[in-house]
Amino acid sequence: MGAAADLFCAAKAAEGASPRTVERYQMILVRAVHRFGEARPVDAIPAAELRAWLLELRSTLSPESIAGCVRGLKAFGNWCAAEEVAAAGGFRGLRRPKVPRRLIAPFSDPELRSLLALADERQRALALVLLDTGLRLSELASLRVGDVRPDGTLHVMGKGAKERIVPIGASARRALVRYLATRTAVAAGDPLFCGRWGRAFSARGIQLAIARLGRRAAVGTRCSPHTFRHTFARGYLVNGGDVFSLQQILGHATLDMVRRYVSLSEADLVARHRAASPADRLVGARG
């Protein structure tokens, strides 16, 4: 099991999987090796035992994390079979659990204004770029100064090493210019956002900076980069954008993933219904 796990992670890295993806695989398989033993043969681990272990993990992990574990274990099993390392029937036989779809509340406009009013130059640039692009946290953390293109777009390296071009509005660009003006000797290859001593601002560092801003502004909504991603998706559609261009901006392969991000608030639904009510159009609002 231990040797197969190491070979699998090395193979995924060689195939060009992103470092973050390889790291997730390693994390899942380290747990599995710890649970079942490094020397235990892969084919000696049946699906029933794997399922029992996953049930144990439910006491400490969220349903989303459990589903991620299953995806990783199945990918490992499929690779073992394809490479003739082992039949891995137990791993390949796992079924993905259903994950409850929770609606993530987007920021309200007053909350966003409160956040921006209390932000320093770096936090303001972070918040406006997230709000205006819907970038994933890992994508934002990997941006370089040269990824801000003269035509008002960002060159983004997304999941699976897939590149895409993401538009960015004038307000977010101005915030970036002001933030970069606070730094010295900025070069195209430098990180777009820096932490202490000019080092790249890590994904964890960005999370903490956004969370601190949220606490300072006392917003009721969970303040995280992922909330900004939901807020962007909702705002983009409410303001007239279409789902197909939104899919491209967010970097999703299917529209199904886009639907998970989009939840209209009650006020949005009422306004949309008022504008599109079939009954009111037929007999009039006062009829």
Image (cartoon, grey):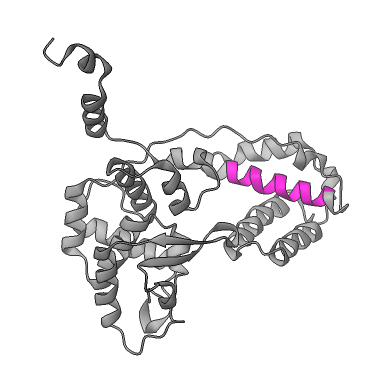
**Residue 65 belongs to magenta span:** no
Decide which of 32, 145 is in the foreground and name it: 145
Residue 233 vertical placement versus 169 (above, below): above
Q: Quadrant of the C terminus?
A: top left
Q: Position of residue 93 (x, y in %)?
A: 76, 36
Residue 118 image offset from top left, x and y in percent? 17, 63
- Quarter location, residue 2: bottom right
Task: Give the quarter of the image for residue 66.
Answer: top right
Please state the extent of the stretch shown in magenta in the rendering. Answer: 67-81
Does the magenta stretch mainly form a helix, a strand or a loop?
helix
- Horizontal and vertical percent position of residue 232: 33, 50
In the image, taking residue 89 as reference, residue 163 lies left or right, namely: left
Q: Is residue 183 above or below residue 104?
A: below
Q: Please determine whether, in this image, residue 274 is positioned above or below residue 22.
A: above
| Residue at position x 22%, y 53% in the image | 112
Q: Is residue 264 left or right of residue 274?
A: right
Q: Nearer the viewer, residue 163 or 103?
A: 163
Would you say residue 79 sits in the magenta stretch?
Answer: yes
Q: Would residue 25 appear left or right of 203 to someone viewing this image?
A: right
Across and down, in percent, residue 61 comes to 53, 44
Q: Tell me which residue sits at (32%, 65%) in the image.
A: 126
Check the image and name the residue furthest to the left: 286
Q: Is 251 or 244 nearer to us in this picture?
A: 244
Q: Nearer the viewer, residue 53 or 196?
A: 196
- In this view of the protein, can residue 174 be seen by the observer? yes
